[in-house]
Amino acid sequence: MPIQSLTWGPLEGMQPRQRAWRFVAACLLLICVVLLEWYSHLDYSLGVLYVLPVALMGTLGRRSWVIAAAMICAYIRGFFTDLSVIEYWLRFLMASIAYSGVGMLVAEMSRNRRRLLAAFADLRLEKERRHLAEDQLRMLASSSPAAIVTLDHQANVIFANRAAHELLAIADGESLVGRRLDDNLPVFAQALSLGSSSPAMRITTTSWAKRVNGVQFPIVTWFSTYEDGPQRCLAGIFVDVSEEMRDRELESFRHFSDYNRLLAGAVSHEIRNMCSAIAVVTSNLSRREELSGDADFGALTTLIESLGQIASANLRTTKQQSAEWVKLSVVMEQLRLVIEPDWSEHGVEIEWSHEDVMVQADQHGLLQVLLNVTQNSLRAVEDREGASLHIATRREDDRVVVSIVDNGPGVRDPSTLFQPFRPDADGTGLGLFVSRQIMHSFEGEISHVPTPSGCRFDVTLVAESI
């Protein structure tokens, strides 16, 4: 029971049945004192015994009840004395004051006792809750798959859970507690080595750690410092991200290889076109009699044929992207996280409207296509007042269309948009060409939709059947 509940209302903390029994007991005790004095006919007064029912009434805590009981006892006590009227009322007044004082003292003592008992009960409850919370936190820290350590100001381990021992390759039967970790976790030691005047830190960072056998591995850490001055300590969590780094690098390498293959296909396509044109010219020149037996002209023809054969290997379709069913909303959320900061810097709030539907695509490839289109839109509108970007999805039978619309200057010649090495492109002129090849790899399509103003691209994907 909270202590505040006993601050007001003296009867708080006592059950109604207990109050009733004490009230009855006080009345019975008063009756016993009256009967004793009535039948004893002693020469001296038993007035001191009247204090007992008043004191018992004081345990109920009601001041009005105490005063009423004191006055009743003082009044009854006067029946057993042979006094004048003035002496009777004077003694009644003095007795009422005395009895009331004793009752008030008992009432205050009773109230303080209940408060102390309630406070003790609260403290015991808080102690039990604290022990329970500590046990839960200890169990959580011990069973956590993430490594948790606390270090003192000298980078000595105060606490380390089982995951920390496993990540740092501590042998069975040995403990990290008491060891220095400035060599194993340099990022923690560096944080503790900062001056005591530096503010408390709460940081997330990527770093490297070293096991006791000398093997290094990448980690992501979350740590904070506590305590002030030279006795600053540190609590940190770190996880091994070797698998994530390996998967990320392999995925990046795969996409890098795919994009190189698409680039080589584009170059092969252009070389093949030029070789065809040159072959037509050399065929026309070969009809001239003065060049029919020329050795240099024959060598040039052979070189052109060889170059055409090299370029005839169409690298664009030698390998298909690995397509799977992915949630379009997940890809759109990733796109939002990547592009929203750049658009916010230009004061543009992107309008989003997308459905939670499964589409057939390579998630990374689809994200790259959407990034390419939105980055083109950003370059088109970055110097315009009132720039806007709207990204919406809609379903059309077994297809889902993602429309990306900006209010930029638009496209001058849409017929060359998806041709490689466009002369009017801002960069190499391969972005949209590669994007279309990526979309084709999982049966998708990207197209430019003419609009009265601005620019609109539609990215079409195969949707999961309803």
Image (spheres, rainbow, N blue to C red):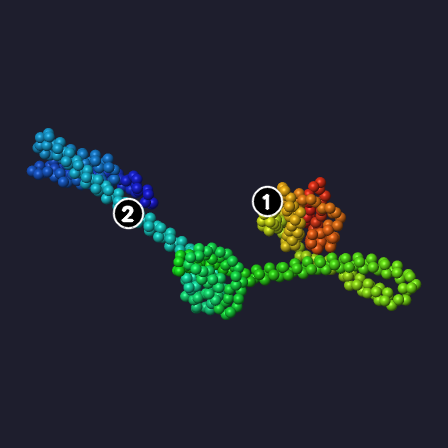
* Res. 67 visible in picture: yes
List x then y, in percent, for residue 460: 69, 48
**For the view shown, which residue lies furthest in the right direction?**
289
Provide the secondary structure element on which disc 2 rests: helix
Vertical relation: 106 (above or below) 208? above
List x then y, in percent, for residue 433: 71, 53
- The residue that label 1 is drawn on is 347
Marker disc for residue 116: 2
Label 2 sits on what residue type?
A: Leu
**For the view shown, which residue lies furthest in the bottom direction?**
213
**For the view shown, which residue lies furthest in the top direction?**
85
The answer to whether 116 appears left or right of 132 in the picture is left
The answer to whether 212 appears left or right of 58 in the picture is right
**Image marks 1 and 2: residues in contact by CB distance under 8 Å:** no
List x then y, in percent, for residue 10: 28, 40
The answer to whether 166 appears left or right of 103 in the picture is right
* Res. 145 visible in picture: no
Marker disc for residue 97: none
Question: Badge 2, how many Cα within 10 Å: few under 14, some, many 20+?
Answer: some
Residue drawn at the location 80% of the way across and 62% of the way down: 308
